[in-house]
Image (cartoon, rainbow, N blue to C red):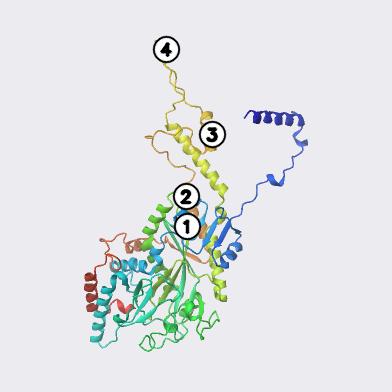
């Protein structure tokens, strides 16, 4: 400490000797600054060590992100696997990672079935976009009762039995999927749990082929929810003509019933033409084609697709927020973001249905359509995250400023112990203790800032100081909204919606104003007796709702 003071005195004396006290300032020579002393310009970085998709790095570099392999020093991290609690606990407030915890509540078929079936039972009209689905681990008896009752009711009217599709709850790319019409044909798989869903027997066809749409949604914040839908996507076609629909002689023809690219690309009839002639086309092409037929694809149909996406995510938003706050109690709601792939199909009456939701939608670029779409999608995502605002230096300066304000407010409410006056002499008038000067307070704050701890902690019963006044949640939200509006690109903000009536309607349909507890039908607590009663009642009521499917 002493040597440091002497060195400072020596340097000061040397400076005075070199520059006369009354020298003309205009004649002073500037001291050259070495390159190492200049502050290096900060550049946001992206870590792609844990993803196999090269398009992620290309998109990041396309908007100015620099690649990094550092496991801790990054701005955005993209990984194919789920995010862990340990990752969230060690993240800094200026970092962003591409998964939320607990997304299995939305993207595993069994959890999705439980959540959306509950909502369909409570709000049958609003959630009719979800086909009836059963988790066979717990609802096998209920499914058998329902299917049998429906078959008898349809047979009485001279109609064939309905068809069902069985899917593994945690598989993708069409693995393990098959069709059946007789409940006795269902085969449980010992390797994984299965869900059974009513098959959409009368889908909308284009050129005689069944197709579905991959629609991309982006969550940038879960509490409060901020949700966007991308205006471009994929229309994926089967490679066998659909004909008159499912029958015993075609139930095993997966290239007729499934639209998955992973299934149909192996077919000799797969056409890699893109645009308007291939087995994989753009979503824009499909919607505009419907426009040309007078079906208002880019208007009413697109609006209904956005609506069912918002309803699906709002169903699990409270659980996502709860788990996020548990895993990252000190982080704001923007530490994570999530790209979701919704598989949507239209029936012959142009009504959309959600078939599945994927939390890791494929980013493979095996066709020209894929390459153009997915690189543009990722670039839009990275711009919307506003990476240039995530400079660690700015965050640290803001944190220090807020810490100083908190310490200052604490020091004004705390009773100083070290400045207490000595006991007064007998017969003398005691003098009140002098309040600490502003200089003393500043010194106290500065020393605490350097040591990263308060120099004089407030008493335990002292009231908590108010938050800093230079930034408020409302101001931060307004600024974020303004930035988003200027950088949406091909994204549309669907939540929070700008229309108050839409906010109220979606909140009501997600149980905010529910009349009572929602009884689960698909899950551990489902009662098979209640399932049988509901099945019989549904069969007796006819096809009022199920004919949508």
Dot 4 lies on which element?
A: loop
Residue 321 percent across, percent down from the top left? 39, 56
Task: Say which label, 4 or 3, has the lower sequence index.
Answer: 4
Q: Residues within 10 Å of mark 3 (few under 14, many from 20)?
A: some
Q: Alpha-carbon distance for marks 2 and 3?
A: 31 Å
- Residue at 51% over, 31% down: 441
Disc number lying in front (2 or 3) = 3
Task: Say which label, 1 or 2, has the lower sequence index.
Answer: 1
Task: Say which label, 2 or 3, has the lower sequence index.
Answer: 3
Q: Alpha-carbon distance for marks 1 and 3?
A: 35 Å
Q: Alpha-carbon distance for marks 2 and 4?
A: 56 Å
Q: Alpha-carbon distance for marks 1 and 2?
A: 21 Å
Residue 54 percent across, percent down from the top left? 58, 67
Q: Which residue is denoted by mark 2 in the rendering?
A: 475
Contact (Cβ within 8 Å) of mark 1 with mark 2: no
Contact (Cβ within 8 Å) of mark 2 with mark 4: no
Residue 115 is left or right of residue 412, and the answer is left
Q: Residues within 10 Å of mark 1 (few under 14, many from 20)?
A: many
- Residue at 26% over, 74% down: 141
Q: Which residue is denoted by mark 3 in the rendering?
A: 447
**Which labelled disc corresponds to residue 425?**
4
| Residue farthest top in this picture | 427
- Residue 546: name its quadrant: bottom left
Q: Alpha-carbon distance for marks 1 and 4?
A: 65 Å
Q: Which residue is denoted by mark 1 in the rendering?
A: 336
């Amino acid at each position: 400490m002493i040597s440091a003071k002497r060195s400072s005195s020596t340097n000061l004396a040397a400076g005075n000797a070199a520059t006369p006290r009354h020298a003309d300032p205009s004649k002073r020579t500037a001291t050259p600054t070495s390159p190492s002393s200049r502050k290096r310009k900060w550049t946001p970085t992206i870590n792609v060590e844990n993803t196999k998709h090269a398009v992620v790095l290309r998109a990041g570099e396309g908007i100015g992100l620099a690649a990094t392999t550092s496991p801790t020093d990054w701005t955005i991290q993209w990984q194919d696997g789920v995010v862990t609690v340990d990752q969230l606990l060690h993240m800094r407030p200026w970092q962003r990672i591409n998964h939320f915890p607990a997304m299995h509540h939305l993207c595993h078929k069994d959890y999705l079935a439980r959540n959306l079936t509950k909502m369909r039972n409570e709000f049958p009209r609003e959630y009719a976009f979800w086909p009836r689905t059963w988790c066979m681990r717990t609802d096998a008896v209920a499914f058998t009762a329902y299917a049998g009752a429906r078959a008898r009711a349809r047979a009485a009217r001279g109609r064939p039995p309905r068809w069902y599709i069985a899917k593994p709850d945690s598989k993708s790319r069409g693995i393990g999927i098959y069709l059946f019409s007789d409940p006795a044909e269902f085969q449980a798989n010992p390797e994984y749990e299965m869900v059974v869903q009513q098959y959409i027997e009368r889908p909308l066809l284009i050129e005689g082929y069944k197709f579905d749409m991959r629609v991309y949604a982006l969550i940038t914040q879960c509490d409060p929810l901020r949700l966007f839908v991308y205006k471009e996507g994929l229309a994926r076609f089967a490679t066998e003509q659909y004909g008159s629909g499912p029958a015993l002689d075609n139930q095993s023809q997966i290239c007729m019933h499934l639209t998955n690219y992973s299934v149909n690309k192996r077919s000799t009839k797969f056409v890699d033409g893109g645009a308007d002639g291939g087995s994989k086309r753009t979503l824009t092409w499909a919607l505009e084609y419907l426009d040309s037929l007078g079906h208002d694809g880019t208007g009413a149909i697109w609006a209904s697709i956005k609506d069912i996406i918002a309803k699906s995510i709002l169903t699990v938003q409270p659980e996502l927020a709860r788990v996020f706050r548990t895993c990252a109690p000190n982080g704001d709601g923007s530490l994570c973001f999530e790209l979701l792939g919704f598989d949507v199909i239209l029936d012959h009456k142009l009504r959309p249905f959600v078939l599945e939701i994927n939390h890791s939608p494929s980013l493979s670029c095996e066709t020209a359509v894929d390459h153009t779409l997915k690189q543009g999608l990722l670039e839009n995502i990275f711009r919307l995250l506003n990476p240039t605002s995530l400079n660690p230096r700015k965050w640290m300066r803001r944190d220090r400023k807020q810490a100083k304000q908190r310490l200052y407010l604490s020091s004004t409410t705390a009773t100083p112990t070290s400045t207490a006056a000595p006991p007064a002499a007998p017969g003398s008038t005691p003098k009140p203790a002098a309040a600490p000067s502003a200089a003393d307070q500043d010194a106290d704050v500065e020393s605490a800032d350097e040591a990263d701890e308060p120099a004089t902690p407030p008493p335990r019963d002292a009231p908590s100081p108010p938050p800093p006044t230079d930034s408020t949640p409302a101001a931060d939200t307004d600024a974020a909204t303004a930035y988003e509006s200027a950088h949406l690109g091909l994204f549309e903000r669907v939540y929070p919606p700008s229309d108050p009536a839409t906010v109220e309607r979606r909140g009501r349909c997600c149980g905010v104003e529910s009349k009572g507890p929602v009884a689960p039908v698909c899950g551990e607590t489902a009662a098979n007796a209640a399932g049988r009663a509901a099945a019989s009642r549904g069969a007796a009521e006819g096809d009022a709702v199920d004919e949508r499917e």
